[in-house]
Amino acid sequence: MSWYYTPHPTVYPAEEFDAAGDAAALRKAMKGFGTDEQAIIDVLCARTNQQRQEISEAFTRELGRDLIEDLKSELGGKFEDVIIGLMLPPAKYLCKQLHKAMDGIGTNEKTLIEILCSLNNEQIHDVVANYEEMYDRPLAEHLCSETSGSFRRLLTMICIGSRDPQGTVDPDLAVEQANQLYNAGEGKLGTDEEVFYKILAHASFDQLEIVFDEYKSLTGRTIEQALKAELSGELYDALSSIVECVQMTPHFFAKRLHKAMDGVGTDDAALIRIIICRSEIDLQNIKDEFEQMYNKSLYSVVKGETSGDYKRALLALIGDA
């Protein structure tokens, strides 16, 4: 399967790891007048999330202090966003990002799509459980109050975690599903959106890979062309994101990173989120894909778009230029 690439992170577990030593180094970096930001970067951007949790526990155990609270009181701006993001367990970090996308006036649908359409069932269950614990409200209920129509139904299906497990493949069913997609879209007047979002939200990524191949054999057109012709708005954005993640996840995130930095201004929230979330999964693959797609390195583009400690922290997570 083309989507089944070998993921390569940019952040690996530190060897000869000493949580108490790191806790002491962080305390020293924040104690007294002024803050040694570089020392904080050197420790936290070169440890895995699991190691950061151990450092946090050691900080409380050895020093009787809360590491996250100390960091918040010493840091500010986008640099603080990166460091605090690194300190949160991955599922809790994603919950905060989802809540932020829906809180207050307006909804950031792009963030909802980026997060929810790229997660597998196990990750979804983890996020759903943490969300209710953190905000005393089911994620699906919050999504329902902020979205509408077929887009809402798709996100609700994803939240229920009804996607077949990885490795679930039925070639005969794939032929049938390709036909269903054709008959719901290009093969009729109007579009039966329900067929599209049910298949794309339920089938495993392995299965969808075969469905998309069958669709092309059947119609001579790609599934992307079909979606573009038949759908629009958030539902189109969400389903095409699922298609991209099926075909090559690093390509999806490379594109998102490019969009975050292209043109006037930078979408720092998206930049920080993707680099933090993918640094221990496949950020190296994303870097390679980015360079291939845009003929410049992710490192150099981020370097040009950011500054100060914020820049140094992101570049430390991205790794070699």
Image (cartoon, helix red, strand yellow):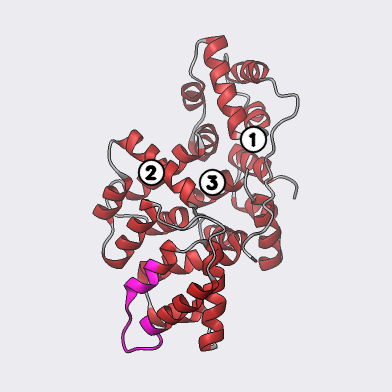
Residue 141 is situated, as x and y percent measured from the top left of the image, at 26, 49
Answer with left or right where residue 293 lies relative to residue 141. right
Which residue does the numbered mark 1 point to in the structure image?
45
Q: Which mark is residue 272?
A: 3
Looking at the image, can residue 33 be seen? no
Relative to 10, is 189 above or below? Answer: below
Relative to 197, is 165 above or below? Answer: above
Reading the chain from its start, which is encountered first: label 2 or label 3? 2
Of badges 1 and 2, the one in the foreground is: 2
The kind of residue on which mark 1 rests is Cys
Answer with left or right where residue 244 lies relative to residue 197. right
Reading the chain from its start, which is encountered first: label 1 or label 2? 1
**In contact (CB < 8 Å): disc 2 and disc 3:** no
Q: For numbered disc 2, what is the local secondary structure?
A: helix
Q: CA distance from mark 1 to mark 2?
A: 27 Å
The kind of residue on which mark 3 rests is Ile
**In contact (CB < 8 Å): disc 1 and disc 2:** no
Which residue does the numbered mark 2 point to in the structure image?
128
Which quadrant would residue 59 be assigned to in this image?
A: top right
Q: CA distance from mark 2 to mark 3?
A: 22 Å
Q: For numbered disc 3, what is the local secondary structure?
A: helix
Residue at position x 35%, y 34% from top?
134
What span is in magenta? 183-198
Which quadrant would residue 292 be assigned to in this image?
A: bottom right
Looking at the image, can residue 65 be seen? yes
